[in-house]
Image (cartoon, rainbow, N blue to C red):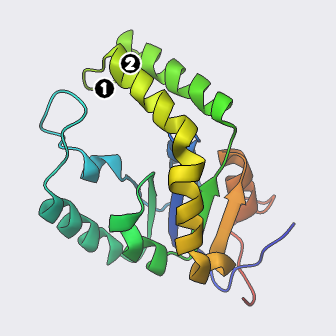
């Protein structure tokens, strides 16, 4: 089907726009591989504040991330690039999720509604926050993804670009449910 890994992937870094399926992929891979998954939003945003938009102190965020990167196995998922370079460097696999902007918009809106209805735990969000997120979502490829792929050229051999979380999961697992064991670069 495609790629063979040099050894069993134990460090997986997933990036993509908001609503691209990063969390879904991380949760499913975590369950199947028994690897802990980390949402990088939990490091980037100040979790002690009851609303979105307040960043965690950079020094604390970087220290937490440095500790996580040292672990033997992990799955990171997030939109972040500059402060997570060590994650890309140490990752066995970098998954890049690229569904269409319209599908991502639908997921973002659906998630917003679920949060407003109390079906999903969340901080306080406003309609203006939703509008800003959708606007940023439509600029993601040009402003974020293309520069990210350019900066990760040295990691091209371990990068999987997939249209969906399920595609990424399928590429990392064979039909029997075992994580692929790669051969050579």
Label 2: which residue? 115
Q: Residues within 10 Å of mark 2 (few under 14, many from 20)?
A: some
Q: In this view of the protein, which residue sits in the foreground, 138 or 18?
A: 138
Position of the N terminus by quadrant = bottom right
User: In the picture, residue 66 is in which quadrant?
Assistant: bottom left
Seen at 22% across and 66% down, the residue is: 62
Seen at 68% across and 42% down, the residue is: 99
Q: In this view of the protein, which residue sits in the foreground, 67 or 56?
A: 56
Seen at 46% across and 80% down, the residue is: 89
Do the numbered discs 2 and 1 sit on residues whose CB atoms are within 8 Å?
A: yes
Q: Is residue 84 visible?
A: yes
Label 1 element class: loop
- Disc marking residue 122: 1
Label 2 element class: helix
**Residue 150 placement (x, y as % from top left):** 58, 71
Position of the C terminus by quadrant = bottom right
């Amino acid at each position: 089907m495609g790629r063979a890994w040099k050894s069993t992937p134990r460090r997986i870094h997933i990036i993509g726009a908001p609503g691209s399926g990063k969390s879904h992929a991380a949760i499913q891979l975590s369950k199947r591989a028994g690897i802990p998954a980390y949402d990088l939003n939990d490091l980037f945003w100040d979790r002690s504040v009851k609303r979105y938009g307040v960043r965690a102190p950079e020094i604390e965020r970087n220290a937490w991330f440095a500790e996580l990167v040292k672990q033997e196995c992990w799955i990171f998922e997030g939109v972040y690039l500059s402060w997570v370079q060590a994650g890309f460097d140490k990752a066995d696999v970098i998954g890049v999720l690229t569904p269409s902007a319209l599908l991502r918009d639908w997921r973002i809106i659906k998630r917003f509604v679920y949060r407003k209805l109390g079906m999903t735990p969340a901080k306080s969000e406003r309609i203006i926050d939703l509008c800003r997120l959708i606007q940023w979502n439509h600029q993601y490829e040009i402003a974020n993804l293309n520069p990210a792929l350019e900066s990760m050229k040295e990691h091209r051999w371990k990068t999987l670009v997939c249209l969906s979380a399920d595609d990424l999961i399928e590429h990392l697992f064979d039909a029997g449910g075992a994580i692929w064991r790669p051969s050579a670069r």
